[in-house]
Image (spheres, rainbow, N blue to C red):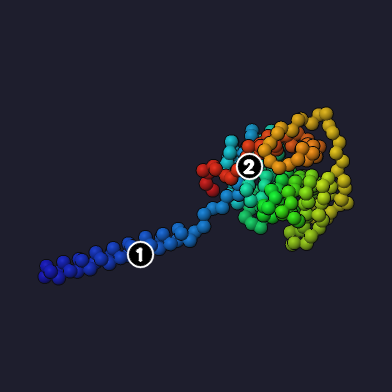
Amino acid sequence: MRPVRSRALQVVCRLVCCVLIMQFFCLDRTRAQTPAAQTLGSMRATREVYLNGSPATGEQTVYPGDTVRTGADGAAALTSPGFGVLVIPAQTEITFRPPPYVATLKQGSVEVRSFPGGRDLGIQFGNTVLYLPSPEVESSGIITLRGDGSAQVSCIFGALGLKSVDGTGLVVLRPLQAVGVSADGKLQKVESVPLVPSAQSPPVPVMTGRIAPGRYIALAALAGGTAAAVLLLTRNSNHPAVSPVSP
C-alpha cells in the first residue's frame, strides 16, 4: 500500500506545482498586457498649489485624471515634451485628461505655449475647445474663464483655433487677436489686442527656450505680472518628467 500512497502523493504534488506555475504565468501575462500610466509632464509649483487636493511643492509628475488648483498667491507650470508648456496662474482649477484633449479648464485662466513639432493640444472650457490649427508652428495664447461661464481667448503669437465640442470649427486667431466666448459657446467679434507698454509690469526673467524677445514683450503686455511668474517657473523646466510620484 505504501508504494501506491507514495505515487498518489507524487501525482498530487505535481498537479499542485502545475497549477501554481500556470497561475504565475497568467499573472505575468496580465501585468505585461496592462499599460503603464502615461505621464503628461512635469509640473513646477510655487506657493499655494494643490494636486488632487494635496499641497504640491517643488516638482511633481502629472497624469491624466489629475486636478490642479491654485490659491490666491499660487502658480504652476506644466512642461510636456509632447506639446509644450501650460502655465496655471492664481485662482485657477484645471483637470488633465487623456487624449484627444489635454485638459478641461474649470475656472480661472491658463497660458499655453506649444513646442514646434509637438502633437495637437486641446483644452476644453465650457462647450468650446482650444486647439492648434497648425501643430508644427510654435504658438502661444491665454484662456480666461469667468465666473459666469463666459471666456476670452487671446493669441500672442502663432495661431490658435476654437471649435465646439462636437468638432465644428469656429475661428482661428492670429497674433495679437482676441475673441470673447459666451457661456453657451457663441463667439463675439474678433478684436486686435494693442501692445501697450506698462511701467507697472514687472521685468520678464530670461528663460531657456526658443521665444524671441519681442514675443516676451507681447506676453507681458497681455498677461501682466502672470507672464513673469510663467517664465520664472518654466525657465528651468524644459525636460521630461522625473518625479517618482505615481497616480
Secondary structure, mark 2, is loop
Residue 30 is drawn in which quadrant?
A: bottom left
Q: Which mark is residue 238?
A: 2
Residue at image point 67% right, 45% down = 85
The picture places residue 32, in percent across and down from the top left corner, at 46, 59
For the point 63% across and 53% down, the residue is: 97
Of all residues shown, which one is farthest toward the top?
199
Q: Tell me which label, 1 or 2, sits earlier in the chain.
A: 1
Label 1 vs label 2: CA separation? 46 Å
Q: Quadrant of residue 71?
A: top right
Residue 170 visible in image: yes
Q: Position of residue 73 (x, y in %)?
A: 69, 33
Q: Which type of secondary structure does the marked residue at label 1 adopt?
A: helix
Q: Nearer the viewer, residue 70 or 241?
A: 241
Instruction: Residue at 76% x, 30% y: name it.
Output: 202
Q: Is 106 or 188 nearer to us in this picture?
A: 188
Residue sitting nearer the eye, 16 or 32 = 32
List x then y, in percent, for residue 87. Answer: 69, 42
In the image, what residue type sits under mark 2?
Asn
Kindly identify which residue carries mark 1.
22
User: Is residue 52 toward the left or the right of residue 146 in the image?
Assistant: left
The quarter of the picture where the N terminus appears is bottom left
* Badge 1 density bin: few <14, some 14–19, many ≥20, Cα 10 Å: few
